[in-house]
């Protein structure tokens, strides 16, 4: 009986993993630190066509390099978050990434192919 418990304990520890989990990033590839929430923080000089383009870009009151409340996170914030995860938890065995990751309203084509193109 003792031998079975020792073997079961060794097997259980052999199957222990440290798992990271990321969900619903919604990264804003059009983010502009000087744009307002009224524009979804999209810049006027973006390399992609904004299907919901506004007549005039509204400037924000302050510069926000890492994003602002009311807007999807910019690439700079997502990169910082991933670097911090790697720094704080270097022993993670694998990361589960779930949910959707394309920023809200970035694609007029919300099909799977349209979202893959944005990614």
Image (cartoon, rainbow, N blue to C red):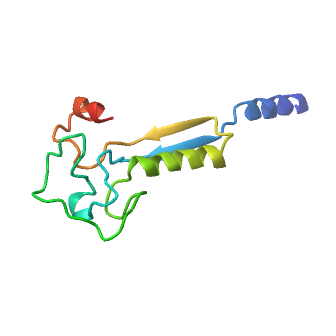
Q: Is residue 45 visible?
A: yes
Give the answer, above or below, for where 27 lies relative to 111.
below
Count the numbered circles shown: 0
Q: Residue 44: x, y in percent? A: 21, 51
Q: Residue 28: x, y in percent? A: 33, 48
Left or right position of 45 against 12: left
Query: Looking at the image, which residue is at 60% across and 40% down?
Result: 19
Query: Looking at the image, which residue is at 24% across and 40% down?
Result: 47
Give the answer, above or below, for where 28 lies relative to 9.
below
| Residue situated in front as seen by the camera: 97 or 60 | 60
Residue most extreme to the left: 55
| Residue situated in front as seen by the camera: 23 or 87 | 87
| Residue situated in front as seen by the camera: 2 or 28 | 28
Q: Residue 7: x, y in percent? A: 82, 28
Left or right position of 67 against 61: right
Query: Looking at the image, which residue is at 16% across and 41% down?
Result: 108
Residue most extreme to the front: 45
Query: Looking at the image, which residue is at 70% across and 36% down?
Result: 16
């Amino acid at each position: 009986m003792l031998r079975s418990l020792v073997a079961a304990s060794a097997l259980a520890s052999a199957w222990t993993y440290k798992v990271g989990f990321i969900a619903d990033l919604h990264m804003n590839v059009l983010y502009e630190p000087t744009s307002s929430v009224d524009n979804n923080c999209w810049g006027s000089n973006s390399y992609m066509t904004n299907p919901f383009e506004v007549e005039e870009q509204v400037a924000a009151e302050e510069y926000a390099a890492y994003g602002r409340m009311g807007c999807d996170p910019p690439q700079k914030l997502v990169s910082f978050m991933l670097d911090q995860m790697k720094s704080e938890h270097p022993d993670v065995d694998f990361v589960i990434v779930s949910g959707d990751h394309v920023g809200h309203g970035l694609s007029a084509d919300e099909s799977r192919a349209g979202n893959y193109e944005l990614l």
